[in-house]
Structures are given as C-alpha cells and as structure tokens.
Amino acid sequence: MQQAIDKKDWYLSAFEGFEKRLNGKSASPLHSARKSAIARFAEIGFPTPRDEEWRYTNLAPILRNAFRPVTDYDPGGVTAGQLEPFSFKGLACIELVFVNGHYAPELSSPRPLPKGVQVSSLAAALDATPEAVEAHLARYVRLDGGAAPMRDHHAFAALNTAFMQDGAFVHLPKGAVLETPIHLLFVSTVRGEATVSHPRNLILAEAGSRATLFESYVGPKEDVYLTNAVTEIVLGENAALDSYKLQRESREGFHIARSHAHLSRNSAFSSHVISLGGALVRNEVTAILDGEGGTATLNGFSLLEGRQHVDNHTWIEHVKPHCTSRELYKGIMDGASTGVFRGRIFVHQEAQKTDAIQSNRTLVLSDDARITTKPQLEIYADDVKCTHGATVGRLDQNAIFYLRSRGIGLEAARQILIQAFANEILDLVRVEPVRAQLERLVSQQLEAGRRAREAR
C-alpha cells in the first residue's frame, strides 16, 4: 500500500515536469483534459488487491520501478533492420512506427490513401485538424470510475490521458473502404534507465466505412519498461472494423492497455488480442453496443511460460436491442505462469433480443501454472439469449492415446494437440500473411517450452 502511495506522488511530480516541457503548449485545448486526468489520478492513486478488478494482479513489480516518461522523440538507435521481425512479411500495408510513443517518420511506410482518408500521428492531426480530433479524443474512456453498471479502477487510463502526446489517428469518412490494412507498430526501448510511454490512439470510422487495423507492441531487447496504451474506437452506422492487437513486449517489460469501442446502429467490430510477451500484462477491451443491430466479436489468445502474468479483462455492454456479441478467450499456460480472465456482459432493460455468448478456455501444461477465470452475465432484459462458461484442464489423454496408436511419439502428439488448441483462435485471423506469422511464432514458442520441460 505504501509503495502505491509513494509511486503516485512520483508520477504527480513527473507530471509537473512534463507540463514545463510542453514549451508553451499548456494553453492548448488538451490542457484541461490533461489537468482533469491528473487530478483524477491524484484522487484514486494506483489500484491495490483491495480493488476487486485488480484482486489477482499484483502491481508490485511495476511500482518498484521509477519509470521516466519519454516526452521527446528520440529513435534511440532503432533501425529498420531491427524492426523486420516485427513487420508482417508479404503484407502490403500502411505502417506507422512509434518509438516510445512518438511517431518515427523515417521508420514508417505510409501509402497513398483514398480521398478523405487520414492515417497519421495523433500529434500531426492535432496540429492540422484540431477540431476533428478534439471532438472525440478522451470522450469515451471513462476516468471517473464509471457509474453503475460499469465500475472500474482507471488509474492507468488517467495517467495515459495526463501524459498523452502522440499515437495514431485514423479517420475514415462516410462510405470509405480502405482495402490496405493499417499496421501501427509501437516499439519500446530504453537508454540507461527504465522508461514509460503513453501511446494514445483514436480511430474514427464514419457511416458505411470499413478497414482492418493491426496494433503491435514490441520490445526488441530484454529491457525493463512500461507501455501504457489507450485506444478509442468510434464506429458510425453500418461501419465495420477488424482490429488485431499483437503484444510481443520484452520478457522484462510491462504492458497495460485499454481499448474502447463505441458501436452505432448496424456497425460491426471485431477484436483479436494476442499476448506472447511481457512480464506483467493487462489487456482491457470494452465494446459498447449503442445502436440496434450492432455486432461485437471479442477474441483473445495468451501463451504464457516462466513467471509471466497476463490479465485479460473484457466488458461488453448491450445498450440497445437486437445486438449480437461473441467472445472467446483461450490461454496456454506453462512453467509458473499466472493468468486472469474476467469477462462481463451487461444487458440493459431496453436491450431486448440480445444474443450473447461468452467462453474462456485454458490449457494448463504445468503443475505450477495458475489461472483465475470469472465469466459473468448481468441481464435486465427478459427476451434474450445469453450463455457463458469457462473450462480449465490438461491435454486429453484419450486424444494422446489415439495419436500414439497411429505411430506418433508422445511429445509429437502433445505438440499437435497444443497447436490445435491455439489454432482455433489463430485461424480467425483473416489476413493470411499475419495468420502465417502468428502460427510460426506460436509454434516456435511452444517448441521452446517443450525443450524447457524436457530439461526440467
């Protein structure tokens, strides 16, 4: 508890220095948003195990570090060659690269865009079209703890808003169809001391528009750092966005991220969150179905080993009737890793004809691995179809016996079943080069885990 209080004071002091370094920009329209956010953070401080939403995620490893905010762009020696393993080979895409939260133009690969479509850094958009950005920025992610039904501890989102400078801005005008995928590559690196970056992304898709978005968060080295990201997504009527997030932070890095999607009438949003790296990771995904006929799909996959900890929190709120949501989160856990899944579906009284399915499945490969899972439904409408469930288990011995009876060795049989478990999520990735790379990454990590088990 004292550690959380001390670090709260440290960040409050860091904010004072941050304001001084804005070089006259403190009078910008964002100034009031930043000031409100830091005031909210000062009020609530960091969450502790006493907060129900953080009961199973101990922030002590993060709070032990005095992370220095990166307020100025410095490529830090990052080169295009170092980023090749984190790009998608064979995929023609619009790629924006950010180093410690700041846009890196020399490392990015923009492409010609359809008329009216904007894909740029948030800082550039604020300079060029401030009215369009400010009408939505910091309007959707709640910092006040949220009135019922949505109550949560928003310390990290408040810090992100207080320190926000850059990130990605995507604007799709009415009817725009962007066939070329967008890849936002966030790279964290340190130079002598632990750092924290606060990427802020705003995605606006007007009526009838469509796009595919990839977010990658990576650490090329085994550095100690904190990535604290927030992405706000606004979908107009009949708009559609396929969103993919790949987390490949360093094994010593920390990752806290919140993604919030607001859906209008007949809009469609799909989210796929893949977690392969990081020492301590928290993914929060929210979808608000605020228009009739909306569809939200939330999928996730985590592959944990060693002492990694991954916490997946989801919130799907059915506000209007005739909406559909589907959710499937899967995890594979090895070593002494720990995981958390807490998924909540809230159905308002007005949201009749809601159709919602939620599932969490975990495959445990080690006696020392632990998972806490809590799928939840809260329903106030009386004409709905809603189900939820969770399973935690080991490999099916009957399936292993079947494969071995056909001449397949024990370890090979195990690897086939583990890969098949992962592929249920990976097969949902619609872009072939990305799916192929994810399958390779997961296969390589599973093979490394197999060798580690044999060595024990």
Image (cartoon, helix red, strand yellow):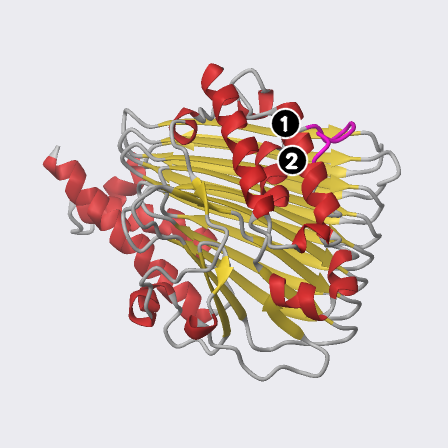
SS assignment at label 1: helix
Residue 82 image offset from top left, x and y in percent: 30, 65
Q: Magenta residues, as a range?
A: 143-151
Q: How many marks?
A: 2
The amino acid beneath tag 2 is: Ile
Q: CA distance from mark 1 to mark 2?
A: 6 Å
In the depicted structure, whether residue 110 falls above or below residue 364: below
Answer with the quarter of the image where residue 16 lies. top right
Residue 251 image offset from top left, x and y in percent: 31, 43
- Badge 1 crowding class, 10 Å Cα cut-off, few under 14, some 14 to 19, many 20 or more, is some
Q: Are marks 1 and 2 in contact (CB under 8 Å)?
A: yes
416 and 90: which one is in front? 90
Residue 138 image offset from top left, x and y in percent: 71, 48
What residue is drawn where x is 45% and y is 46%? 301
Residue 285 lies within the magenta run: no
Judge from the rendering whether residue 160 lies leftward or rightward of residue 365; answer left or right.
right
Judge from the rendering whether residue 180 lies leftward or rightward of residue 316; answer left or right.
left
What residue is drawn where x is 79% and y is 63%? 131
Residue 144 lies within the magenta run: yes
The amino acid beneath tag 1 is: Ala
Q: Which residue is mark 1?
A: 42
Q: For residue 301, say whether it is visible.
A: yes
| Quarter of the rendering occupied by the C terminus | top left
- Magenta stretch: helix, strand or loop mostly: loop
409 and 154: which one is in front? 154
Answer with the quarter of the image where residue 308 lies. top left
In the depicted structure, whether residue 110 falls above or below residue 431: below
Task: Give the numbered dot on residue 38.
Answer: 2
29 and 364: which one is in front? 29
In the depicted structure, whether residue 169 falls above or below residue 159: below
